[in-house]
Image (cartoon, rainbow, N blue to C red):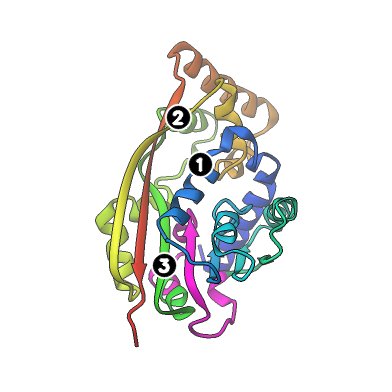
Amino acid sequence: MNKETALARTEAVFNTASDYFDAPALSFWNRFGQRTIDQLALNSGDRVLDVCCDSGASAIPAAICVGSTGQVLAVDLAESLLQLGRQKARQQGLNHIEFRAGDFESLGLPDESFDAIVCVFGIFFVPDMVAAVRELLRMLRPGGKLAITSWGKNVFEPANRVFWDAIRAERPDLVKQFTPWDRIREPDALKALLEAGGATQVEVFAEAGTHTLDTPEDWWTMCLGGGCRGTIDQLDTAAQQRVRDTNLQFLQQQQIQALNVDVLYAISAKRNS
């Protein structure tokens, strides 16, 4: 798949998923976005670029940290998610954050424009991740910090496995042989990516946690509000219902009230000139 096709597909999936993206069942977006910003130690007045920003899970905490004298530029492909971010920023009176539609690899922004750059759960959608890291570092001032957050090995299990088994039973052609983040799901692989792109002082923190389900239905809401939406929408109505029923029955029978979730946080610097 070429880059243009991959970007168009990602944009379409997340524009569609925006109707559930900010549902309470998907509170993990805010949790991991906040955790990423917490590790950056931003200062008042900093300029921050947040790419693959979705609806602002990390951009809004960044805007709060840098204060009204700072500036946050939040970029994403999905205009529907950006609209959600703009609404939340207005509600919180954050006038120093801009949500802009675009591909972060071709923003055309000047060199060394930002004190910090953030990419949460997005770098793995880019075919050439090393080139993407280089472009992010180009826009970062010397001594500035780059934060990349990605999924680890164990993501939303055991429900994720059941979901894909149910998809296989309906449409084997829709089952992915690997997920985009598989390339960097180990700490060493994520560190190697950043170093290959020119980052220095790379530190990777692995966090093994859980995400609570208030009801089994929360899992299906999560599927509709994330990357799985693109697969679900390719099923006919009857097949969608069977997949949903299979997932909810499993969770109910096994009395599963939380899903495992592994996250990797990488913080790195740009070498001083």
Residue matched to label 2: 165
Q: Amino acid at mark 1?
A: Asp
Q: Nearer the viewer, mark 1 or mark 3?
A: 3
The span shown in magenta is 104-132
Question: Relative to 239, is 32 above or below?
Answer: below
Q: Is residue 17 magenta?
A: no
Nearest to the observer: residue 127 or residue 191: 191
- Label 3 with label 2: CB-CB less than 8 Å: no
Residue 234, percent from left and from top: 63, 40
* Label 3 – label 2 distance at C-alpha: 37 Å
Task: Estimate how packed mark 1 is, as few (under 14), some (14 to 19) or many (20 or more) residues with alpha carbons within 10 Å.
Answer: few
Q: Earlier in the sequence, mark 2 or mark 1?
A: 2
Asked whether the viewer can see residue 125, the reply is no
Task: Using the rendered view, name the quadrant where residue 22 is placed.
Answer: top right
Residue matched to label 3: 146
Q: Residue at x 63, y 29 (%)?
A: 240
Q: Earlier in the sequence, mark 1 or mark 3?
A: 3
Q: Residue at x 48, y 68 (%)?
A: 117
Residue matched to label 1: 173
Q: Quadrant of the C terminus?
A: bottom left
Q: Residue furthest top?
A: 253
Mark 2 element type = helix
